[in-house]
Amino acid sequence: MSLVLYLLITLKPPNFPFTSSAVKMFSMGKINPYLPLFLASCLFFISHSQTTSNTSSQQRCLPDQSSALLQLRQEFLVHLSISSNNFHGQLPSTLGNLTKLIYLDLSNNLFHGEIPSFLGNLTQLEYLSLRNNTFDGRFPILLTNLTKLQYLDISTNQLIGPIPCEIGKLPQLSYITLGYNSLSGAIPSSLFTMTSLSRLSLSQNHLTGPLKIQNISSSPLQTLLLSGNKLYEPIPRSISNFSQLEYLALSSINVKGMMELNIFFELKRIKYLSLSGNNLLISKGKVNSPLPKFQLLDLSFCNLREFPDFLETQNELAYLDLSSNKIEGKFKEQLDHQEP
C-alpha cells in the first residue's frame, strides 16, 4: 500500500479551528477532508527530514510522490498547522508557494532567523500565527500586503525595531498580538483608528509614548494590553473614547508623574483593569456618573496610602489586588458593605 493511501485511510481528520472560508469549502465538498492533514504531514517532512540507507520506500515520500505533492499542495492546501512540535531552522522557501493558504499556524516550534518576505505572497491568509519561536530582525513590512488577514500573532519572539504604520491599513484585521518581543519606537496611531480591530496586545516590549488616541468612538476595540513598555507620557483622557473597551492592562509602563485613576471610570464597559507598578492618584469625593463594574482590579505597587473609597460600590469584583502599597490604619469593612 502506498504512503498516500496509507495516510488517507489511517489518519482521522484533525479537530482544528477553521476559518469561515475553509469551513465553507469543506461543507460544499470541494476538498477531501483528509487532504489537509496528509499534506501538512508531508510538506515539512520533505523540507526538513533526512533520508538514510535504512529508511524504506514506504516510510518516506519518493521523488515521484514529492513532485505530485508539490502540485497538490499548491492547488488545494488551505489549512496548515504544525504547531507545538520541535521543527527548527529557517522556514523553507517552498512555503511561499502555498498561495491558497487561508490558515497557517507555525507556533510553538524552534524556527529562527528573520521572518521571510515570501510569506507576503500568501495573499489569501486570514490567520497567521508565528508565536513562541525565535524569529528575529524587524517586523516584515511585506506582511502588510495580506489584506485578508484577520488574525496575526507573532508574540514571544525576538523582533526588534518599530511597528510599521502600514499595519493599520489592513481592512479586516481584528486580532494583533506582538507582545514579548523587543519592539521599539512609538506605537503607530493608525492602530487606534482601525475599524476592525478588537484586540491589540503589545505588552513587554520597549515601545514609547505618547499614545495618540483620536476620536475613535466607533472603534470595536475590546482588549488593549500595553503593560511592560516605556510610555513615559501620561495616559490621555481620550482613552475613554474606546467605548467598547473591556480589558485594559497598563502595568509598569514607566509613566512620569502620577496616573489618575478617574480617567478610567469613563470606560463604562471596562471589566479588567491592571495598573500595577504605577504611581496612582485617586481623587476623593463622589463621581457624578455611574462607575463601571470591575471584575478584576490590580492596583498593586501603586503607592496608595488610603483604602480606595470607590470600592464600596464594586459588588461584582472577583479579583482585587492592593498588595505592596502603603495603606495604613485598620482594615476597612467596605467589602462587607457593598451595594446590592
Image (tube, helix red, strand yellow):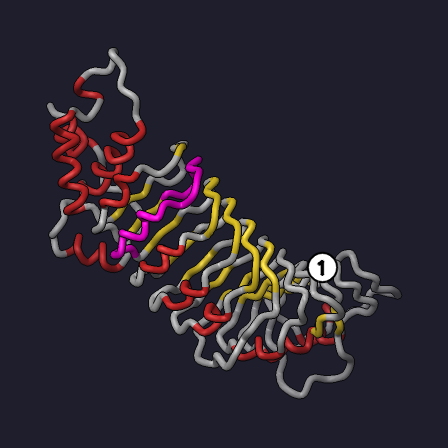
Residue 112 shows in this picture? yes
Range shown magenta: 106-125
Vertical comparison of 36 with 44: above or below: below
Looking at the picture, tell me which residue is in the foreground, 94 or 30.
Answer: 94
**37 relative position to 67: left or right:** right
Horizontal and vertical percent position of residue 186: 56, 64
Q: Looking at the figure, which quarter contains the N terminus?
A: top left
Q: Could you say whether the residue bearing mark 1 is in a helix, strand or loop?
A: loop
Using the rendered view, name the quadrant where residue 168 is placed: bottom left
**16 relative position to 223: left or right:** left
Say whether residue 115 is magenta: yes
Using the rendered view, name the quadrant where residue 74 is placed: top left
Say whether residue 29 is magenta: no
Q: Looking at the figure, which quarter contains the C terminus?
A: bottom right
Looking at the picture, tell me which residue is in the foreground, 156 or 281.
Answer: 156
Horizontal and vertical percent position of residue 47: 28, 31
Query: At 62% from the left edge and 58% from the top edge, which residue is drawn?
Result: 229
Q: Please name the amino acid that badge 1 sits on.
A: Gly
Give the total of numbered labels: 1
Horizontal and vertical percent position of residue 141: 40, 56
Disc 1: CA contacts within 10 A as few (<14), some (14-19) or many (>=20) = many
Query: At 18% from the left edge and 31% from the top edge, which residue is drawn?
Result: 7
Q: Residue furthest right?
A: 329
Looking at the picture, tell me which residue is in the foreground, 205 or 330.
Answer: 205
**142 relative position to 96: left or right:** right
Q: Residue furthest bottom?
A: 288
Looking at the picture, tell me which residue is in the foreground, 159 or 327.
Answer: 159
**248 relative position to 41: left or right:** right
Query: At 61% from the left edge and 66% from the top edge, which residue is drawn?
Result: 209
Vertical comparison of 67 with 205: above or below: above
Horizontal and vertical percent position of residue 111: 42, 37
* Residue at mark 1: 277
